[in-house]
Image: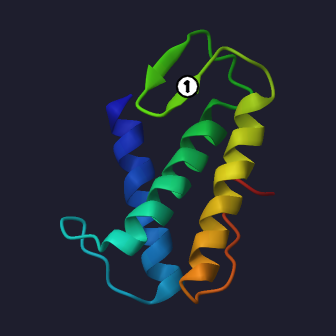
Amino acid sequence: SGTALNDFVEDARLTVQDYTGVTISSTAIEEKYQVVMTDITKAYAYASMSGKGVGFNFNVTEFRIDKTGNEHSNLAKFHAAKAAKRLAELGFGGIKMGKVNG
């Protein structure tokens, strides 16, 4: 639902803010953090669908979610790894995301 997506975005913002020590406003997010937050949000969304028997197909902009088995878990890990790589490129090292890894 939209509420869950909003929660994922807010969790992503707080994760990046806590990890970097940089204050990130919910209304004025620097571009360099937007990409990381997008990857974290995707990871949270895919992780939430993993193992829940998602019974639908849909397209949203550049990515597609299909009714599948383990794919959501793999996509969650993929986007978590992308977020960690992007944070490292910004000079903040790696990150372990509890909702996705573990």
Q: Which residue is mark 1?
A: 64
User: What is the x, y in percent for residue 56?
Assistant: 56, 10
Image quadrant assignment for residue 64: top right
Q: Secondary structure at mark 1?
A: strand
Figure coloring: rainbow
**Residue 52 shown left or right of residue 63 in the figure:** right
Image quadrant assignment for residue 46: top right
Position above or below: 5 against 63? below
Of residues 20 and 4, the one drawn nearer to the viewer in this rendering? 20
**Residue 83 shown left or right of residue 38 in the figure:** right
User: What is the x, y in percent for residue 3?
Assistant: 33, 37
**Residue 38 shown left or right of residue 86 in the figure:** left
What type is the residue that disc 1 sits on? Arg
Question: Which residue is pictured at 41% across the width and 38% down the height?
Answer: 4
Question: Which residue is pictured at 68% across the width and 45% down the height?
Answer: 76
Question: Which residue is pictured at 40% across the width and 53% down the height?
Answer: 9
Of residues 52 and 85, the one drawn nearer to the viewer in this rendering? 85
State which quarter of the image contains the C terminus: bottom right
User: What is the x, y in percent for residue 72?
Assistant: 70, 33
Mark 1 residue crowding within 10 angstroms, few (<14) / some (14–19) / many (20+)? few
Question: Which residue is pictured at 54% across the width and 57% down the height?
Answer: 40
State which quarter of the image contains the N terminus: top left
User: What is the x, y in percent for residue 86?
Assistant: 58, 71
- Work out whether residue 98 can be spotted: no
**Residue 41 shown left or right of residue 25 in the figure:** right
- Work out whether residue 92 can be spotted: yes
Position above or below: 25 against 41? below
